[in-house]
Amino acid sequence: MKVNVNDHYNFEVGLERDVLTVEGAEVRLDSAVLSDKHVSIIYQNRSYNIELVSEDKGEKTSIIKVNGNLYQVAIQDQYDLLLQQLGFDNSKTSKMKEIKAPMPGLVLNVIVQEGQEVNKGDNLLVLEAMKMENIIKSPASGTVKKILVSKGDKVEKNEILIQFS
């Protein structure tokens, strides 16, 4: 995972079989959960009281308080990074330009039309892959410029499905 703190500090963090790593180095700490929003941690003989102030699970962001200091934390997991590579970039600074097929499949239905305004989360099309129907949703608001597929088309992974203006 990639963890960003206060839009300034970036860390590679991993957790596998109860082993925490930061930037590839194993980190040992003792922790005690005090409540659903409070944790006490001892790291290198220092005590840290951590409180979850607010959380946006959809955007994977949180505000935490550590020993009285507030920090904004944003997390990108492996799936966020994959979506970014496939053109589903959720970054607030980038404009949505195109939607690519996340996997090979068959277009069952195209829900939008060229020129249509769409909002983040709106259904764009239905793609059947591995005998499952997958609804492809808009990762951001925009206007459909061109639809490059039709109902019944077979598509390959990373094939451009819809372009936005």
Image: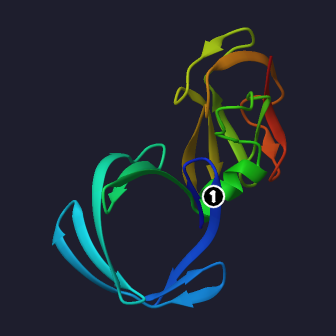
Residue drawn at x 67%, y 18% is: 142
Q: Amino acid at mark 1?
A: Tyr
Which residue is more in the foreground, 114 or 143?
Answer: 143
Quadrant the N terminus occupies: bottom right
Corner quadrant of residue 89: top right
Q: Is residue 154 left or right of residue 78?
A: right
Quadrant the C terminus occupies: top right
Number of numbered discs: 1
Q: Is residue 107 above or below residue 34?
A: above
Q: Does residue 47 show up?
A: yes
Q: Is residue 70 above or below residue 27?
A: above
Q: Is residue 155 left or right of residue 14?
A: right
Which residue is more in the foreground, 15 or 49?
Answer: 49
Residue drawn at x 36%, y 89% is: 45
Q: Position of residue 6 (x, y in %)?
A: 55, 49
Q: Position of residue 57 (x, y in %)?
A: 39, 48
Q: Does residue 130 show up?
A: no
Q: Which residue is mark 1?
A: 9
Q: Is residue 6 left or right of residue 71?
A: right
Q: Is residue 85 left or right of residue 63?
A: right
Residue drawn at x 48%, y 43% is: 59
